[in-house]
Image (cartoon, rainbow, N blue to C red):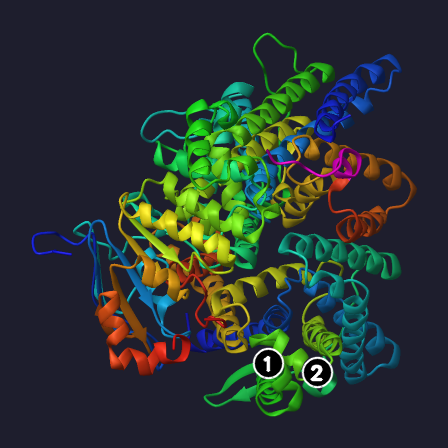
Amino acid sequence: MDKGNMEPVLKISNLFKSFGALKATDDVSIDLYPGEIHALIGPNGAGKSTLIKQISGDLEPDLGSIHFLGKNMAGLGVADRAQLGLGRTFQVSSLALEFSALRNVMLAVQAKSGSSFRFFKPVMKDKALIEGAMEMLTQVDLQERANIPAAELSHGERRQLEIAIALALKPKVFLLDEPMAGMGPEGSKKLTEFLDKLRHQAPILLVEHDMDAVFALADRISVLVYGQVIATGSVDEIRRNPLVRTAYLGEEVV
Amino acid sequence: MTSVLFIEQLLNGLQFGVMLFLMAAGLTLVFGVMGLINLAHGALYMVGAYACATVANYTGSFWLGLVASLVAAAVAGAVVEILVIRRLYKRDHLDQVLATFALILIFSEGTRWLFGSFPLFLNVPDILSGPIELPGGLLYPLYRFALIIIGCLVAIGLYLLIAKTRLGIRIRAGESDREMIAALGVDIRLLYTIVFALGAALAGFAGGLVGALQSVQVGMGEPVLILAFVVIVIGGIGSIKGALIGAILVGMVDTMGRFLLPSFFQLFMNNSDATSVGSALASMSIYILMALVLVVKPKGLFPAHG
Amino acid sequence: MDKFDREKALNVLIALSLLIIPFIAIEMDEPFYVTLATRVVVFAIAGVGLNLALGLGGLISFGHAAFFGIGGYAAGILASHALNYEPLMTSLFELNGTTEMLIIWGVAVVASGLAALIIGLFSLRTSGVYFIMITLAFGQMIYYFAISWPAYGGEDGLSIYVRNKFPGVNTLDPINFFLICFTLLMLSILLISVLKNSRFGAALQAARQNDERLSTVGIHPFKIRLTTFVVSAMITGLAGALYADLNRFVSPSMLSWHTSGEIMVFVILGGVGRLFGPVVGAALFILFESIFGGLTEHWMLFLGLVLLAVVLFARGGLIGVIAGKTRHG
């Protein structure tokens, strides 16, 4: 992809984060351009979760900067970044479990379409909210399960619901943390197709263990080992990179 | 104001602080190990004070009373843990608050039923009555001085218990990872009962000791309990070190506030106004301290977890 | 019948029974029961306030006595100035006390709301056990302040010699005062039910279930909670003003942490998060107090045992037992 005259949507520059002696993020620089899927891979304990938390605003980095749409994210919390257009899904799904699938998505539609400080009109009589949410559920093929409480959804359905919520936010960037985890082969295949189209809505930073999905989807891959990015490049470059093979791929893909 | 008076108030603040530490240590230990918020901790303080007063008045020996306060509070703690508290570890904080609030009602009314509404009195033992002369010629009540020493010894003892003994290792393991200690084959139910009883014994001991300074009555544990909460919020919930420093800080600020603020306001007010403004403000001083600490460190001065 | 409808039917039944009791009491020439019913209503309002924070928002405030007491003192202070013909302040402009309930309620609501705003700014930075302890501590701070501040009676409290006035109603008639309180109770329950179904209510309930979920869609949980805490305190503060008028007396005991515990008990005995839970809880509490209080002076012991049993074995409260589990749409 030619990125010569494009500005990155998300630009992470020289990020550092330590917990005591442990360098969880060690001089990480990653960027994400419009229309692309940039996959972030690495063995367990490489610091992927810590990095995600710094992007989403759960953690403040010790040093370095994160720019999103050209704006420095320093000091902004999770809700602020979400409002600016960061759509995130969680590795372990994070839902309002008592609410139905529909109401979970409605919450996002409500956040996107104006203030939550409206005290009188009942949400369940708000056609715009309900229809907006149903549309998102339909996109992830969950419309049949709209009225089921999130607590009663299957694992796979919860992951779909998380994506529907992220979609409803109409984000400028998707930050997807292992969306394939526990999906089963059929589910993974469908989700892969779905994400392939999703990149046209907004670029995706994809943290994923499922290498088939990563190789099928990613425009670029960055490999994180012991908090450091040891390589960034196209799928082929990463496959060929000897450093990556020994450090990581050697164990999983032969 | 003389410097003698000032030093005396400093010592009073220290004495108050170490007694608060005995209360706060148990609370913070129980929260750190079992994740339980125990409103009934003040009731155990009261149990200790009643046990001490009853046994001391019956036998004539303050020291036997003190032993009784330890034993009674530990036994009451163990029984309550086995009958009630044990069922609460996996419940949410709301259930814990309500159940332990219910325990306060039961303990308070039960005590009133047994002992009546009139306070009991407990005398300072003869050997510790009278003043002690400190360097510089300051005369200070020997009993209060002894409380400071005893409090410090208990703090050291607790440190050694947790740092050096097998029980301490298990307690620390319990704080960091409950599943791990179960995997190590430690009987976790027994450990929890012991920790709870230990916390109760510390509270009861404090009750017995302080009982000789105040009247022993129903409800005496509640103001102390709330101060102990302030202490552990300041120190960081779950941290013994935080409890110690928080307790001394609260003891000092409260005592010195009551001592200094009225005279401070006398600088620019008439006497009676200064006394009322000063004492009203002094009664709020530790809560203001707590608010300030929260602004700077929402998890307390020594956060125990992360 | 659907369980959901069963709760609605039960609510209507509760409201009607509560409304009828004082009229029966007057028929039977037992005016004391009118006062008792008014107590139920006033405590219920206090509980409705807490239930918003606790039931819908999951905010375990152990400091609501502060707002109850501030509301009470607002009534007491305004009325005592009016009755003694002493202006509240004279320095900038002259401000007089009042015996008009409408003004007193307004002051009570604003004062308790402001207190909640300040307490909330500090305590809502934390969560879990910290929040419980900090609300408890701030409540206690106001309690000690009331005791050591001598201007309004200090430890002895403050008497209101004549019940305050309401336009067009003779408030000295106990039935009329009951009806005023009852109307306010119904209005406050209506307010909660509207809030619950609104966008704000959706965000609040989501904040209780999953903080992270709410912030990830871009809604600040802190702002939602702070607003809730303030509204909740306002309702409880209003109850405090009514309580002062009912007893014609305010004292620091309204501010004590036992009061916080009792308001919480109203909510729990009835059923957390249920619209009419606090009404049932307050009624049970008063019933318990009058029955066992007549038999033994140690009735609090039995209250403790019952509360313990409810917490350990019947977590949905009475409405939960009768109407079944809550459904969430």
Note whether B92 is above or below A198 in the view shown. Answer: below
| Furthest residue toward top | C168
Evaluate if marks 1 and 2 touch, with contact meaning CB atoms under 8 Å apart.
yes
Q: Which residues are magenta?
A: C318-329
Direction left: furthest residue: A5
Mark 2, Cα crowd under 10 Å, few <14 / some 14-19 / many 20+, is few
Kindly identify the amino acid type of the residue bearing the numbered disc 2.
Val
Q: Residue B173, labelled with which disc? A: 1
Provide the chain ID for the residue under circle 1.
B
Dot 1 and dot 2 within a common chain? yes
The residue located at (63%, 75%) in the rendering is B179
Question: What residue is shown at x 53% (from left), y 48% (from top)?
Answer: A157
In the rendered view, would you say C16 is above or below C107?
Answer: above
Which residue is at the far right? C295
Amino acid type, mark 1: Ala
Check residue B186 in the rendering and tell me which mark sits there, or answer none: 2
Q: Chain of mark 2?
A: B
